[in-house]
Image (tube, rainbow, N blue to C red):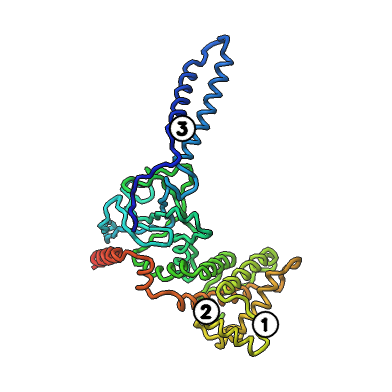
Amino acid sequence: MPILFRQLTDPGASVTDQERLATLRVRYELARESLPSGDEMDAEERHDEFASIAVELMSADRAESARKAPPNPPNFACQHAHLTGFSFDNTTRFLDNSSSIVSNFIQGQLIPLLRYQYEDVFLWDCPIGDEVAPRRRTVMVSQVSTDVGKSAVWITFLSSLKIAATIEQDYQEVFEEGGYEWMYYFTPTLSQIDQSFGSLPRDRCSPTKILQYGDLLDYLPTVELLLRDQLYYVASQQLISSIKTNSFCVTCAKYPQHRSTHHNSEPPIWERAEFIPQLDSAMVQAARSIEALIGEPNAMKTAADKHKMKEKWTKVFDLDPEAEHQTSGMTNIEHYKHVYDNYRNPTAHARREISYKLKRGDCVNMQFFAYILLQDYLKKHALPLKEAITQLEFNEEVLELRDQIALSRLSTHC
């Protein structure tokens, strides 16, 4: 991990700017004190002068604030961000509803967690009195390299964490909340409310998912693959977006309708017209999640075409291309060709027509097919946990904290 704290210097600072600002403040005070109290001859002139100095000082103050806290992090003044949306609970709750802090963290301490491309992620035990962590919840802080500005795409740790948490919940809970709450001249010994946020907006109201330290282990292989494989990152985003547009129960989709708890029923006739655009969008997004991984199917008219498509399939998935698909009776590879030609393309390229024939069941079948393939892809391409820990430089001392909390919670219920 890099050295956390080094003297931040402002390359834009100059004595001339500081002297000019100081001079303006003196002129402002003198002009304010000399404002006329009655009907003096030069009252209007002095009021105009005061107003002119006030406008000039306001402009200089804004320029000084922008110089000290540039609004484009990461930069020399702002390289740390609180990752909102997730936190860790260090509290053990007893049977009498009292609680105890189990963590050995020192308030204001930063514990290295992992490295994620441009980011060094830390656990931060917020000092007591913090508006965000009144119960000593530990949050995550990311120190971001300014080199990120040279990259065309930045796959952030937080975005990957949200995707991994969604996948771990079988896509039944989509994690959307949370973002990068940038802190200028970050000082970990200060509570979060006392940090400097400049003019950037703060994320004070978004819900927080309370994680256990062991949850990170469940997420690590997925988080590592999302960084290593941009195609999988895009595919996961597309499927999540599809499910947000047309939600369905993955568990029920796995079983025949008579065994399902939730039926993927069609909308009533009076809602159908307004519901169809959602199905259109969800259908295309689900198909694109598959396309991101394997691309468009070829014509598959000749034996050579089919052989080429099977070779491509087996490089990407472990799922047998010749196995029978559970709903269509076709092989998996034929089913992909079928849904691509009969649903994906007509839906994506419809211009002046409404897809009245499209049913919610068709959309759910496409989404579930994408879900099966993405889960298969994850299983095939994700690293084993130990390798993911190595690749992400995960701090395994955090696991000792997990075991410590688990043992403490166990002892309180024995």
Q: Nearer the viewer, residue 246 or 300?
A: 300
Task: Give the quadrant of residue 145.
Answer: bottom left
Q: Quick one: label 3, few (<14), some, or many (20+) residues within 10 Å?
A: some
Which quadrant holds the C terminus?
Answer: bottom left
| Circle number at residue 205 | none
- In this rendering, is residue 192 above or below 376? above
Read off the residue under disc 2.
316
Q: Residues within 10 Å of mark 1 (few under 14, many from 20)?
A: few
Q: Quadrant of residue 279?
A: bottom right
Describe the element under mark 3 as helix, strand or loop.
helix
Inspect this view and state whether residue 156 appears: yes
Per the model, the C-alpha gap separating discs 1 and 3 is: 68 Å
Tell me which label, 2 or 1, sits earlier in the chain.
1
- Name the secondary structure under disc 1: loop
| Disc sitting over residue 299 in the figure | 1
Tag 2 near tag 3, CB within 8 Å: no
Q: Residue 58: percent from the left, percent from the top? A: 51, 31
Secondary structure at numbered mark 2: helix
Q: Is residue 22 above or below residue 189?
A: above
* x, y percent for residue 370: 56, 75
Which residue is tagged 3?
Answer: 17
Please name which of the two marks, 1 or 3, marks the residue nearer to the observer.
Answer: 3
Q: Position of residue 214 (x, y in %)?
A: 34, 67
Pointer 2 or 3: first along the chain? 3
Residues 198 and 11: in front is 11
The Cα–Cα distance between marks 2 and 1, rounded to whole angstroms, is: 19 Å
With 260 as the anchor, is 404 left or right in this view?
left
Give the image location of residue 269, x and y in percent: 69, 68
